């Protein structure tokens, strides 16, 4: 197993149990205490878990600034973005939301012909300036932390849009609570886009799974497919696919220990 994959599995295990002893982790993952300590050190450094004598506990997530999140899970996000872009056909009208994973799609879209991109992400719009892609920015209030625009019907007529494919990010993905986000205005904008789009894809790296945050965007059965990386455990994959959720799992460029 890749080091980064094992660390993701450890994080998922700690997230599920909240507080775990180190000796429990060595038995669960069949590795030495030295290996577990190295993995834990990295997860503590990444501020995903907190260490105490003989064990670890999960740190409940809060939404960080977009600029800070751009470098988290970067290889996974690029792999997911490339897979998402491969689903886009010439001549389509697509929506890219304000997440850091959908932002990584822009380099893979510039060679598309007669493409229209609707977005609430200012970085996405800026990246596509000068390309042959037609860009439409939804109107509304600028959210500074996300460099995004959040909108309601009185500010922007969503019913005028004809979106073939929407690519949505998520802060949390679970069977029970569906797709969730930290911010109410972002969630409202995503709900409106989902309601008018022909096909909806969720682009979310494996760290977002089995996690629920403040606001539900939609149940998982309202999206066509969730595209993620291979950091998911087999149990998580089975949990989603057994309930009818379509997953597309891509491999990130990661190194072994």
Image (cartoon, rainbow, N blue to C red):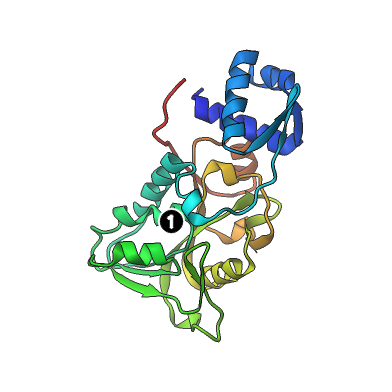
Q: From where the camera sits, is residue 234 visible?
A: no
Which of the 4 image quadrants contains residue 95?
Answer: bottom left
Residue at 50%, 56% (x, y): give it: 66
Residue 228, percent across and down? 49, 44
The local crowd at label 1, few if under 14, some if 14 to 19, many if 20 or more residues have their Cα within 10 Å, is many
Q: How many marks?
A: 1
Nearer-the-camera pick, 209 or 147: 147
Residue at 56%, 29% (x, y): give it: 42
Looking at the image, which residue sits at the far bottom? 154
Residue 251, percent across and down? 42, 36
- Element class at badge 1: helix
Residue at 75%, 37% (x, y): give it: 18
Up/down of 32 relative to 206, above or below: above
Nearer-the-camera pick, 38 or 97: 38
Up/down of 220 relative to 92, above or below: above
Residue 26, percent across and down? 67, 18
Which of the 4 image quadrants contains residue 181?
Answer: bottom right
Residue at 53%, 77% (x, y): give it: 151
Nearer-the-camera pick, 153 or 73: 73
Which of the 4 image quadrants contains residue 6?
Answer: top right
Residue 152, percent across and down? 56, 79
Q: Is residue 70 left or right of residue 240?
A: left
Q: Is residue 119 left or right of residue 51?
A: left
To which residue does mark 1 refer?
A: 102
Q: Is residue 146 left or right of residue 93?
A: right
Q: From where the camera sits, is residue 83 visible?
A: yes
């Amino acid at each position: 197993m890749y080091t980064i994959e094992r660390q993701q599995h450890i994080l998922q295990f700690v997230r599920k149990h909240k507080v775990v002893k180190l000796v429990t982790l060595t038995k669960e993952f069949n590795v030495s205490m030295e290996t577990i300590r190295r993995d834990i050190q990295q997860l503590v450094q990444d501020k995903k878990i907190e260490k105490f004598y003989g064990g670890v506990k999960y740190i409940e997530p809060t939404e960080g600034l977009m600029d800070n999140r751009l470098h988290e899970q970067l290889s996974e996000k690029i792999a997911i973005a490339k897979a998402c872009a491969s689903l886009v056909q010439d001549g389509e009208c697509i929506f890219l939301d304000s997440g850091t994973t959908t932002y990584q799609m822009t380099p893979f879209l510039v060679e598309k012909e007669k493409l229209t991109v609707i977005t609430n992400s200012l970085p996405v719009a800026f990246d596509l300036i000068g390309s042959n892609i037609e860009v439409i920015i939804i109107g509304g209030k600028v959210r500074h932390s996300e460099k995004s625009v959040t909108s309601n019907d009185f500010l922007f007529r969503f019913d005028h849009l004809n979106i073939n494919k929407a690519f949505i990010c998520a802060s949390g993905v679970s069977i029970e609570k569906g797709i969730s986000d930290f911010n109410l205005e972002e969630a409202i904008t995503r709900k409106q886009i989902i309601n008018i789009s022909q096909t909806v894809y969720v682009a979310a790296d494996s760290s977002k799974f089995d996690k629920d945050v403040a606001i539900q965007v939609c149940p998982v059965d309202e999206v066509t497919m969730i595209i993620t990386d291979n950091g998911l455990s087999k149990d998580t994959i089975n949990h989603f696919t057994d309930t009818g959720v379509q997953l597309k799992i891509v491999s990130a460029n990661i190194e072994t220990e």
